[in-house]
Amino acid sequence: MPPLPSLPSSFARIVLLVTVLIITGFSISNHASVEAIVPQSQQPAASPTPAEQDDVVRVSTDLVVVNVTVLDQNGKFVPGLKRSDFQIFEDGTPQRISTFSAEETPFAAAILLDTSGSMESRLTLGRSAAIRFLDGLRDEDVAAVYSFDSKVEQLSDFSPGRDLPERVYGLKSKTMTALNDAIVRAADDLSKREEKRRAIVVLSDGGENYSHASSDKALDRASIAGATIYGANMSEEGPNRDLTGAAILKNLTEKSGGRYIDAPGGLALRDSFASIAEELGHQYTVGYRPTNHAHDGKWRTVQVKLSKPDVTARTRKGYRAPKS
């Protein structure tokens, strides 16, 4: 059979171009059809912006959990209470308790040692306070040590050890104070722990002048982590005490349901730390699902009342609702 006549080169190029366009057009239209069929929820999500990431951290489940310390008239822990002894209110509205726990349980504590310039003459006292707190922990409790000035540094990981890390003894005071940032860092680390009870113990004169985070954000992070803040004022007592710094510590401790310790040392500080360790191991844990379902980012007050007379309940003052 004689060979077929070859097509002109220009015609061959046209045929090849048309073929490519047909194949490409089918691929594009087919891809568009797939996108139209696949539900939006199954398509890859865009990476969140830094602002969105912050919102993701703030959003929690609908279950609000609060740790409650119940004390008698002598300041001693009151054992043996039941779910029916508790009433919980959000913005004054009664809530139905959905979870309740009263067992003795281990806790995790983050110790924040202020090493800013204002603590220059108080670092030795701060180290002694940290040692006293560690000495009061039980075998099953864990603690980590942080320092903070213009930056926050973790000096030891969470462990049952009762000795301060060697690096603490070489710390020198440095200029500014990032107290809020230190609380945010500790709260984020505590949120990863398995222990149900969590505490942030601040050993400071209460100054704040360098944080990126506000006090509200620090409280929000502590609330999300379920961490109670305890503050021991390390500044010198007397007429020269920094009242602004004391007010900062009081605000953080009261709103988180913790305790402000006015004495920087001595028997009063030792006894306070002993009672803190006791209450952390014996708190009541109460959870509820808010009747207010709005995700408006607003602050909501929480109040706990008890049917038992002559006792007081201490817990965090509220929380910030997630924002959609």
Image (cartoon, grey):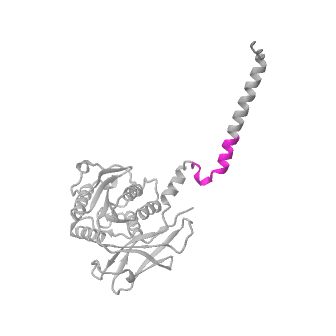
Q: Quadrant of residue 102?
A: bottom left
Q: Nearer the viewer, residue 215 or 48?
A: 48
Q: Nearer the viewer, residue 116 or 96?
A: 96
Q: Quadrant of residue 135?
A: bottom left
The residue located at (52%, 57%) in the rendering is 55
Tell me if residue 42 is in the magenta stretch.
Answer: yes
User: Residue 235 at what x, y percent from top left?
Assistant: 31, 62
Q: Nearer the viewer, residue 314 or 260?
A: 314
User: Residue 270 at what x, y percent from top left?
Assistant: 22, 67
Quarter of the image containing the C terminus? bottom right
Quarter of the image containing the N terminus? top right
Left or right for 65, reference 54: left
Question: Looking at the image, is 133 positioned above or below residue 1?
Answer: below
Left or right for 275, reference 304: left
The residue located at (43%, 65%) in the rendering is 223
User: Residue 160 at what x, y percent from top left?
Assistant: 24, 58
Question: Looking at the image, is 156 positioned above or below residue 225?
Answer: above
Left or right for 10, reference 83: right
The stretch in magenta equals 29-44
Left or right for 319, reference 21: left
Q: Nearer the viewer, residue 233 or 43?
A: 43
Question: Looking at the image, is 210 positioned above or below residue 104?
Answer: above
Task: Give the residue furthest to the bottom.
Answer: 309
Tell me if residue 143 is in the magenta stretch.
Answer: no
